[in-house]
Amino acid sequence: MTKYAKEILDIVNASSDHLTAEEVYLKLKAKNSKVVLATIYNNLGTLVKNGDVRKIAMDGGSDRYDKTIRHDHLICAKCGKISDFTFEDLTESLEQQSGIKILSYDLKISYICDDCKKNQ
């Protein structure tokens, strides 16, 4: 793993937020002024491909990056806020219903967060 990849992985793993590539860039740039945004995108792509970082594709917004620890996401349809939530592992149930071997799944549930409900 390259020096930048390790630093990017550390930033993602240390964050309680779901960071965009630009946010990762700003955090790393504060430590290393020579880094460029393309380096962040290239390394995030490699980290996702290798299974070290989880990519959350956002409809109509920037992709987010997260830890690989098993958890699910609640995404507010109004403001885009992402909240971590751990549901019961559905692998066995999905396999029984589908008749296929499930390697992995990514559960993203769209909802309206409490703040947006208050503002309606």
Image: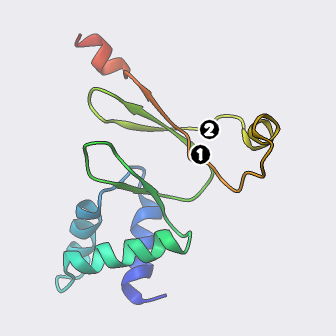
What's the residue at 60%, 55% (across, down)?
Answer: 69
Q: Residues within 10 Å of mark 1 (few under 14, many from 20)?
A: some
Residue named by callout 2 = 86
* Residue underneath mark 1: 71
Q: For this rendering, which residue is in front, 79 or 103? A: 103
Q: Position of residue 15 (x, y in %)?
A: 41, 57
Q: Secondary structure at mark 2?
A: loop
What is the three-letter code of the residue carrying label 2? Thr
Tell me where residue 46 sits by quadrant.
Answer: bottom left
**Residue that appears at 29% across and 75% down:** 40
Query: Viewed as shown, does residue 98 lie left or right of 110?
Result: right
Q: Does 56 appear above or below 23?
A: above
In percent of width and height, residue 91 lies at 74, 44
From this viewpoint, which residue is outermost toward the bottom? 2
Viewer-closest of 108 and 25: 108
Q: Amino acid at mark 1?
A: His
Mark 2 touching mark 1, by CB under 8 A?
yes
- In what quadrant of the picture does the C terminus appear? top left
